[in-house]
Amino acid sequence: MAQTDATPLVASPRSPYVRRKTTRGNFELYSWVFMRASGVVLVALIFGHLFVNLMVGDGVHAIDFAFVAGKWASPFWQVWDLLMLWLAMIHGTNGVRTIINDYAQRDLTRGVLKSLLYLAFTLTVVLGTLVIFTFDPCPPEAPAELLASFCTA
Amino acid sequence: MPNAPAGTLYRGREGMWSWVAHRVTGVSIFFFLLVHVLDTALVRVSPEAYNAVIGTYQTPIMGLGEAGLVAAIVFHAFNGLRIALVDFWSKGPQYHRVMLWVVLGLLVVTMAGFLPRHLMNVFGGGH
Ligand code: HEM
């Protein structure tokens, strides 16, 4: 407001209530919403994952390199697993962050624990993402009997 | 954050114990996931490396561990949906206790579907 005269500015006694602007952002609110939203999606992703890997066919017994190759030869399972990796890691990391905030009372302890947590998050997500995208289901130097049948067909 | 003085242990019944179980299962799943991404990453090393490590998992003891892990995930999943209902459904808080029993019922039903199949794969024949 331009300063036109010398009258000091005094707030009007009847000025309507204005919500104080939050100055620190709404991070914790968004994180709370995210835990619930990601949880719903994760139910479908994880139950599907467990069903296909543990219930169909010979279950755990059938899991080997050829089994993984058979899944990741398809973009469908690549996208499925990528989404599951990211959502579960963000959800889980955010959950553990809450727990650290709850129990670690000294600033230093809390800082160290959270640094380790974020380091583990970054390493795991980067590694997992690279593996999904750089995976070769039919590595040329590998013995054929370890590979999926479509490699030799 | 003040420490609770002695003798005032809060015993919040269903609400508290489901929260404790949700926390414990959440952290357990998180640490499992870190290891699980690492072992799966071995497919990038070589088929032999992956098969060797996965082979050491295919034992009865690990099979029982997997059963426990699946139970933890199924509980956390259903109870997570219950938490969302408590928060967003207008009658949620009123029925939170009933919903916990529904969660436990669904857990039993899901495990009844999963365990026979899984234990057959772990203990029955094969290699
Ligand atoms: C299967 C689907 C899942 C659902 C429906 C789900 C649901 C939830 C919900 C709603 C919360 C918030 C609790 C709160 O704010 O009080 C939560 C917390 C948490 N979740 Fe999940 N979750 C799922 C999967 C996972 C996975 C895969 C992990 C691990 C990687 C995980 C780890 C955690 C942790 C550590 C917490 C924090 C617990 C706490 O603060 O007490 N959850 N989950």
Image (cartoon, coloured by chain):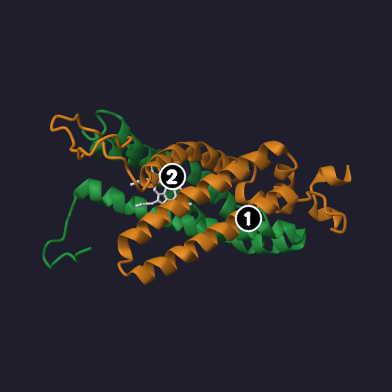
Q: Are marks 1 and 2 on the same chain?
A: no
The residue at 63%/60% (across/down) is B39
- B111 or B14, nearer to the observer: B14
For disc 1, the neighbor class at 10 Å (few under 14, some 14 to 19, many from 20) is: few
The residue at 56%/44% (across/down) is A84
Q: Is residue A113 visible?
A: yes
Query: Mark 2 falls on what kind of element?
Result: helix
Q: Percent position (x, y) of residue A77?
A: 66, 40
- Which chain is painted in orange? A
- Does any atom of ligand 1 lie closer than 8 Å to the CB of label 1? no
The residue at 29%/39% (across/down) is B101
The residue at 87%/59% (across/down) is A141
**Quadrant holding the C terminus of chain A:** top right
Image height check: is B20 above or below A109?
Answer: above
The tag on residue A126 is 1
Q: Percent position (x, y) of residue B115?
A: 49, 46
Q: CA–CA distance between discs 1 and 2?
A: 27 Å
Q: Where is residue A29, by image quadrant?
A: top left
- Name the kind of residue labelled 1 in the image: Val
Q: Dot 2 falls on which chain?
A: B
- Name the kind of residue labelled 2 in the image: Val
Q: Colour of chain B?
A: green
For disc 2, the neighbor class at 10 Å (few under 14, some 14 to 19, many from 20) is: many
Residue that lies at the very extreme toward the front in this rendered image? A5
Q: Percent position (x, y) of residue B97?
A: 24, 39
Q: Which residue is mark 2?
A: B74
Q: Where is residue B2, by image quadrant?
A: bottom left
Query: Mark 1 falls on what kind of element?
Result: helix
- B58 or A27, nearer to the observer: A27
**Quadrant holding the N terminus of chain A:** top left
Q: Percent position (x, y) of residue B4?
A: 17, 64
